[in-house]
Amino acid sequence: MPLPGVMIVPGGSYNQIMERDSERVAITLAAHAFQVFVVRYPVVEHKDYQAAKRALAQAGDYLTTHAAELGLDPERLGILGFSAGGQLAAAYSNQPDTKVKFAGLGYPVIRPLIDQRMGVTTEDVTKLVTPQTPPTFIWGSIKDDLTPYLDHIAPYVQALAANQVPFELHEFSTGGHGLALANYYTGIVNGDRTDDHMARWLPLFLEWLQQLAG
């Protein structure tokens, strides 16, 4: 029986692929009966925002074309992005030919306010939102000083609401940027950074997906 799928897009400011956001998240979701695929996009000396967007589009096309052999239900394919990967995930979910049916964005970069710091030229993803944007789950921390709520998540949520796109938002009072699952499993490769309250995003995300499926 084909399973729902998730494309995972790790963060890393386009300078690396963060271990905390990749295979450890994939293994956790696989344990919840998802087919999971970590998308690796150009970073370091090859970093380029448009090339990274093309990598996601190619991954989406490959997964849907090969869905049967991958045991994947292409009608239940979504995307989950963290930080800079959240920017890419949001951008891909807004493409007219996107293959994803839902999006999860963790402490995402949304607007090009830290391009100089990351060394890339991105875009304001809020301008890509349309009524066709798929249902979106967003979480972050009010203590995030890299992608502050008012600079990134708030404008994106406003764009979703203006276009009547279903969404769910959790802005935690604890935690911070780059916590991944925020539990011990990702903490051991993330400077022992954990937060039990912010770790609630995953069960909330799974509950949200269940209600989406009806």
Image (spheres, grey):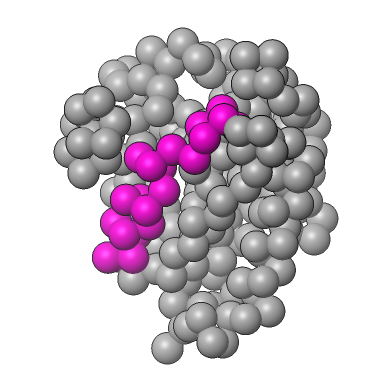
In this rendering, position of residue 181 left or right of residue 194 = right
184 in relation to 57, above or below: above
Q: Position of residue 138 (x, y in %)?
A: 50, 37
Q: Along the horizontal axis of the image, is 185 left or right of 128?
A: left
| Residue 197 shows up from this direction | no
* As drawn, 18 above or below 141: below
Residue 69, position as x, y percentages in the image: 54, 87
Q: Does residue 101 appear in the picture of this structure? A: yes
Residue drawn at x 63%, y 21% as measured from the top left? 118
Please tell me which residue is depicted at 61% across the width and 38% down the height of the picture.
43
Q: Residue at x 57, y 13 (%)?
A: 150
Q: In the rendered structure, does residue 40 fall within the stretch colored magenta?
A: no
Quadrant (top left/top right/bottom left/bottom right) for the N terminus: bottom left
Q: Quadrant of residue 46?
A: top right
Q: Nearer the viewer, residue 34 or 178?
A: 178
99 to 84, vertically: above or below = below
Image coords of residue 81 (percent x, y): 52, 43
Which residues make up the magenta segment? 12-32
Residue 208 x %, y %: 41, 52
Residue 167 position by quadrant: top right
Left of 119 or right of it: where is 194?
Answer: left
Q: Is residue 23 magenta?
A: yes
Q: Give the total number of marks visible in the rendering.
A: 0
**Which residue is at 31% across, 59% downward?**
27
